[in-house]
Image (cartoon, helix red, strand yellow):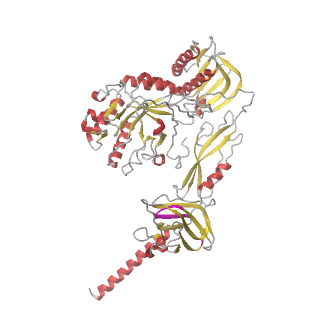
């Protein structure tokens, strides 16, 4: 190479070096890491080349780390050069500490904990720990190790690749605490007054657990009596939408009236009434009493009245006639009233005076009101009396029910019909029927199939008409019967029918013919003028698939969800996307059952945009008599906040529903 060429090469090399160095410095400056390149000190080093300077050099691999001697009480600190405001420390662990503190100082002699409660921290594991605290001014920032954590039984020294310090930002919990302590609803208020928050942050009302009292827009509708309402609030950074906090705040909304001692106390029903204003005296049924439907409402409410008529005959031995018109003393009056729309489709107003009236905006609300009447009458010795008073009643959680596995334990259609009625009595509104599963090497599918007749289990199944009628019965009683066909796991019945579909109980989801079979199976129950699945929801399973191809699983789930939605149904599925995280898009136009967090977490599902339901596998996934000879389900529940406990043989569950914008912390999902 000639002299000129060497000079040109040197100029290019130096220029490139300067550019790269400048870009590196600009990049690191942009990170805001105040400890980068500053002087650091330590109590000891494992070896000289693992000195404290290695934890502030910007390197995160190879030998660029600080490592202490193999004893517990070791420390590391960095001199930031001048007192500055800080609020965050990030430690990128190589060997994490079991217990440690973050301290700060103005002189490197007197140290104070960054937390007012002198908090001792525990490393989450290898990788980054982010420690946020209330901003404070300090020049020196210290890691103080207290105890080490063994790695495969061996106690090494403390070691981290990098120790970073940042200016930080105001902590959201103190802001939220101040908000929660300052919200007050006064008599006559019609709009919730949310307090101001620091500039750069926005406070939002996400939801409430009593929408008829405080709705999502913050409009206040005075209840009958003083009522406590849980608010779901969110504080979010305007500049960084991922920096947010969601929490509950309990407020008391003044009522229109006062429940005094001379009024009938709130009666004991399950679930408890959301609002009750007692009157004096009692209402009594007699052999002259009637069930009266308001004129104009007969078409919608005749079925409800007929059901109530039979229930009252069973309970009271009184044979009440059903009429259309105006009520008289001792009658039960049923009517639809658009003015009750604020109570929701399941809410109702019950007035018990000379006659008892149930008013709701929809038939379901009237049905649930009649269930309350039955429970109130049940308290009287002769089952013919109720305390006079007024109630506005509505659910706290929109989805309340459980899943029964009829695949592994078959139940007769009559049993399921009785369950629908019993669920309605307690105002539970979702009954999921798990139609297929496996016991050992044997798979069971409990629904008649005309396209694949050999797939249906011979030792117990439901005809299409039986299952159709079960869903229609549920609609009368306010119970949504949700059919579930579970794939691609738990599919032994399908593979026994056609071994080409998969092996063991796992479908081969990369085989086009398998996908065609599953879609055709669903189509058999969804298509035509008289479909078998007549309700609004269809569950597609998707739990416990043990294949290795995560992207194939995600494609399969997306295909199923889109297929169900294309039929005009709402798709539901078991949460599995934590276990099968990946890049293939999966439709979020579905409701996800959160049954086991390692498979699919509530937070992930909410962030992905799913509605979610709590379906805890240990309590709410009901498989009676499979693993034990007898299971006695004695549950107590408070779907509508009951004030008394009830033991029953019915397996019950608590359901929570979430919208995508609801909560990262998981504190409440109204």
Residue 156 is situated, as x and y percent measured from the top left of the image, at 45, 65
151 sits to left or right of 281: left
Which sits in the foreground, 132 or 361? 132
Find the magenta span and give its range: 83-99
Q: Is residue 205 above or below residue 42?
A: above
The quadrant in which the C terminus is found is top right
Q: Quadrant of residue 492?
A: top left
Q: Is residue 668 visible?
A: yes
Q: Residue at x 34, y 34 (%)?
A: 438
Which sits in the foreground, 438 or 605? 438
Residue closest to the far top: 287
Q: Residue at x 43, y 70 (%)?
A: 59
Q: Residue at x 46, y 59 (%)?
A: 125
The quadrant in which the N terminus is found is bottom left
Q: Residue at x 55, y 21 (%)?
A: 297
Residue 157 is situated, as x and y percent measured from the top left of the image, at 47, 67
281 sits to left or right of 97: right
Residue 316 is situated, as x and y percent measured from the top left of the image, at 59, 15
Residue 426 is situated, as x and y percent measured from the top left of the image, at 54, 28
Q: Is residue 336 above or below residue 492?
A: above
Q: Is residue 363 visible?
A: no
Count numbered badges in the picture: 0
Q: Main secondary structure of the magenta part?
A: strand
Would you say residue 621 sits in the magenta stretch? no
Which sits in the foreground, 548 or 70? 70
Q: Is residue 374 above or below residue 147?
A: above
């Amino acid at each position: 190479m000639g002299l000129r060429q060497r000079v040109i090469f040197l100029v290019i090399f130096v220029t490139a070096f300067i550019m790269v160095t400048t870009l590196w410095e600009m990049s690191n400056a942009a990170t805001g890491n105040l400890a980068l390149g500053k002087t650091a000190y330590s109590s000891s080093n494992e070896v000289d080349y693992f000195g404290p300077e290695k934890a502030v050099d910007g390197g995160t691999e190879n030998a660029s780390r600080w490592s202490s001697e193999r004893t517990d009480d070791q420390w590391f600190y960095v001199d930031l050069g001048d007192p500055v405001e800080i609020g965050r420390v990030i430690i990128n662990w190589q060997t994490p500490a079991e217990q440690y503190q973050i301290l700060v100082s103005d002189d490197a002699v007197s140290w104070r904990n960054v937390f007012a409660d002198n908090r001792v921290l525990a490393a989450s594991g290898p990788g980054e720990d982010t420690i946020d605290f209330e901003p404070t001014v300090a020049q020196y920032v210290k890691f103080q190790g207290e105890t080490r954590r063994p790695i495969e039984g061996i106690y090494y020294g403390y070691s981290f690749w990098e120790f970073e310090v940042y200016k930080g930002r105001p902590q959201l919990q103190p802001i939220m605490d101040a908000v929660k302590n300052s919200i007050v609803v006064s008599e006559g208020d019609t709009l919730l007054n949310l307090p101001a928050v620091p500039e750069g942050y926005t406070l939002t009302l996400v939801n409430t657990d009593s929408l008829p009292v405080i709705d999502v827009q913050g409009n206040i509708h005075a209840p009958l009596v003083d009522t406590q309402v849980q608010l779901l609030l969110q504080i979010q950074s305007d500049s960084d939408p991922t920096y947010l906090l969601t929490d509950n705040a309990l407020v008391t909304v003044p009522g229109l009236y006062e429940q005094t001692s001379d009024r009938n106390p709130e009666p004991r029903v399950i679930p408890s009434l959301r609002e009750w204003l007692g009157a004096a005296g009692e209402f009594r049924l007699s052999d002259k009493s009637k069930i009266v439907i308001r004129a104009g409402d007969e078409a919608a409410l005749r079925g409800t009245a007929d059901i109530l008529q039979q229930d009252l005959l069973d309970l009271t031995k009184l044979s009440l006639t059903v009429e259309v018109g105006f009520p008289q003393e001792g009658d039960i009056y049923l009517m639809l009233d658009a003015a009750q729309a604020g109570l929701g489709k399941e809410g109702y107003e019950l007035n018990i005076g000379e006659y008892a009236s149930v008013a709701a905006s929809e038939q379901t609300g009237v049905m649930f009101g009649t269930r309350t009447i039955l429970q109130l009458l049940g308290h009287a010795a002769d089952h013919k009396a109720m305390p006079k008073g007024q109630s506005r009643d509505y659910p706290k959680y929109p989805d309340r029910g459980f899943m029964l596995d009829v695949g592994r334990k078959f139940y007769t259609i009559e049993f399921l019909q009785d369950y629908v009625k019993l669920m309605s009595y307690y105002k539970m509104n979702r009954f999921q029927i798990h139609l297929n599963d496996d016991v050992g090497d044997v798979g069971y599918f409990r629904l008649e199939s005309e396209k694949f007749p050999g797939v249906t289990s011979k030792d117990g199944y439901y005809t299409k008409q039986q299952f159709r009628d079960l869903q229609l019965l549920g609609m009368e009683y306010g119970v949504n019967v949700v059919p579930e066909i579970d794939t691609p796991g738990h599919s032994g019945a399908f593979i026994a029918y056609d071994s080409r579909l998969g092996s063991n109980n796992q479908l081969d989801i990369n085989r086009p013919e398998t996908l065609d079979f599953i879609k055709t199976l669903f189509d058999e129950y969804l298509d035509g003028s008289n479909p078998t699945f007549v309700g609004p929801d269809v569950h597609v399973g998707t739990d416990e698939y043990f294949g290795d191809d995560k992207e194939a699983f995600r494609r399969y789930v997306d295909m199923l969800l889109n297929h169900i939605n294309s039929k005009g149904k709402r798709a539901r599925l078991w949460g599995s996307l934590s276990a099968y995280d990946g890049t293939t898009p999966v439709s979020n136009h579905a409701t996800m059952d959160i049954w086991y967090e390692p498979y699919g977490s509530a937070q992930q599902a909410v962030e992905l945009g799913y509605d979610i339901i709590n379906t805890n596998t240990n309590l709410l996934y009901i498989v009676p008599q499979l693993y034990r000879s007898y299971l006695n389900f004695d549950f107590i529940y408070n779907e509508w906040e009951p004030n008394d406990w009830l033991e029953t043989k019915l397996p019950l569950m608590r359901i929570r529903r979430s919208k995508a914008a609801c909560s990262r912390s998981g504190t409440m999902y109204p």
